[in-house]
Amino acid sequence: MRIECYQKVHDARETVGEISLDFQARTRSRGKTTANNGSEVAWFLEQGEFLRDGESLVSENAESYRVKAAPEPVSRVTSSDPLLLMRVAYHLGNRHVPLCVEKDYLLYQPDYVLDDMVKGLGAEVSQCELPFQPEDGAYHSYEGGGHSHSHD
């Protein structure tokens, strides 16, 4: 059986299926998985590129598969104090922790040391399974994959 190699596209396309991947799998530039329709889907991205929830992979014969962030274990930070959530986000960001920032909560990959730090700051931490799509870093360009020091 021949496996098509798919390329990432940013535009919306009609899809023939969906692939569900956790964060770790979406950060790999090469991979292979089985789609929800049973097809094998493989990808080979440029160095520094990654897959995001909602993007598509398309083959030379125009078959397209939507990428979906799979639920995975995460630490969920909540507080009734928005300022405290901002402080927690600052401290986690200062440690270069991949962080998903939502209106009422933060998500990061479970780590008991970080959980203890967050609790020590006064926020609540719970363990759950949710899709995890962290923010792109300040030095990572979503479209280009990297930081340019050109300030024209």
Image: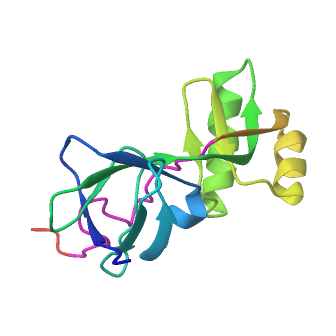
x and y percent of residue 84 in the render? 71, 31
Asked if residue 9 shows in the view, the reply is yes
x and y percent of residue 142 in the render? 31, 59
Please give the name of the residue rendered at 42% of the width and 76% of the height, measured from the top-left corner. 29
x and y percent of residue 103 in the render? 55, 25
Residue extending farthest to the front is 1
Please give the name of the residue rendered at 63% of the width and 44% of the height, measured from the top-left corner. 89
Quarter of the image with the C terminus in it: bottom left
Q: Main secondary structure of the magenta part?
A: loop
For residue 103, side relative to residue 91 (left or right)? left
- The correct choice, above or below, for 3 with respect to 135 in the image is below
Residue extending farthest to the top is 80
* Quadrant of residue 147 within the rendered picture: bottom left
Asked if residue 27 shows in the view, the reply is no
Numbered range of the magenta stretch: 131-149
For residue 39, side relative to residue 110 (left or right)? left
Please give the name of the residue rendered at 40% of the width and 60% of the height, measured from the top-left corner. 51
